[in-house]
Image (tube, helix red, strand yellow):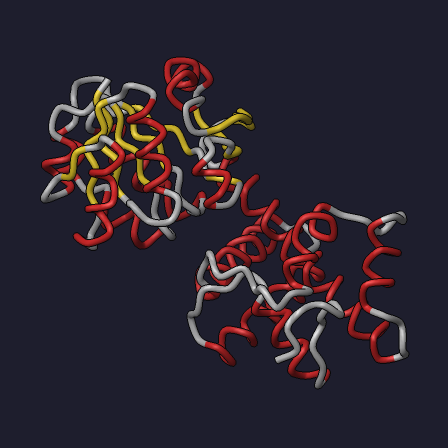
Amino acid sequence: MAICLIGVGRMGEHIAANLARAGYQVHAYDIDPERGVAVLAHGARLAASAEQAAAGADVLLTVLPGPAEVAAAVNSTVLEALAADATWIDMSSNTPAASEPLVQRAAAHGVNVLEAPIGGSPTDAATGQLRLFVGGEEAVLARHRRMLSAVATRITHVGGHGTGYTAKLLVNLLWFGQAVATAEALLLAQRVGIDVEVMAETLATGPASSAFIHDNLPSLLTGDYLPVFGLDHIRDQLAAVTDLAERLGTPHSLADAVRQVHEEALEQYGPLDGELLAVALLEKRAGMLLRAATGPQD
């Protein structure tokens, strides 16, 4: 099976490596030539253009930052270059609304479509332990499950087109919401004189515990704002959730609040990489940092 992979960033490079290691022919392309060179060491081939990478490929994988990049990459020329009955699998952080015209475009070219946005970190990508939220036809997923198992240990089919993107957006909404709520609680605790590590342990062992508190709060308490995803893309994802809720008539007041603080963080810091930069904004407003006693103090 020949695979065209477009997008060789923090996640795409590891995905290309794991697929090549599993025995697949991987033809990679990235708009940044220097970034693309990294895949050569992993046994993948580097193409000079997206069309060249797609030529005769059975699968097109897109691993890109957001909807605009996906729309630019999945054009008619690329789709026409694929093999007959090929499948496009979008592993990007996309939205149902933005992807709909691309799904129709792919169908017009006889290309099957799956969405499989990624859950996990670059470390998870390197070890092949990603989580995929898959939307699309179950029969198409069955055709490609073995290939996807080379990069992910949890592959969840959540429904038809659009549901995979939505599931990932909702997971992100809750994670960012937990980050903001936890930071506000810890800042207040610290203000009244409770040691931040004592409060963190109290939260971790009580009914307010969460995956964020167990897995990510320790990094935050060392001053790590997790610079693996752009604040502008985070804002766009949260906006996609609140816009969808508004259109479908479901409550979204808490989602609005999470979106607002991230919009304000974007205004403060610009489109920097940092999944916890909204917490940095809250620290700035409180005039104090959330740091463990052994962590950096500046």
Q: Is residue 222 left or right of residue 25?
A: right
The image position of residue 2, as x and y in percent, is 21, 22
Q: Is the residue 65 above or below the residue 280 in the image?
A: above
Name the spot of residue 283 as percent of width and height, x first.
68, 77
Q: Position of residue 79 (x, y in %)?
A: 18, 33
Describe residue 222's horizontal placement relative to residue 27 as left or right: right
Residue 212, placed above or below residue 17: below
Looking at the image, which residue is at 20% across and 55% down?
A: 32
Direction from residue 196 to residue 33 in the image, left or right: left
Classify the position of the C terminus by image quarter.
bottom right
Q: Residue at x 71, y 70 (%)?
A: 291
Question: Residue 190 occupies which quadrant of the picture?
Answer: bottom right
Q: Is residue 47 left or right of residue 125?
A: left
- Which of the 4 image quadrants contains residue 154? top right
Residue sitting at the far front: 294
Instruction: From the viewer's side, name the closer residue of 270 and 198.
Output: 198
Q: Position of residue 296 (x, y in %)?
A: 64, 73
Q: Residue at x 72, y 72 (%)?
A: 290
Q: In which quadrant of the rendered image does the N terminus lie?
A: top left
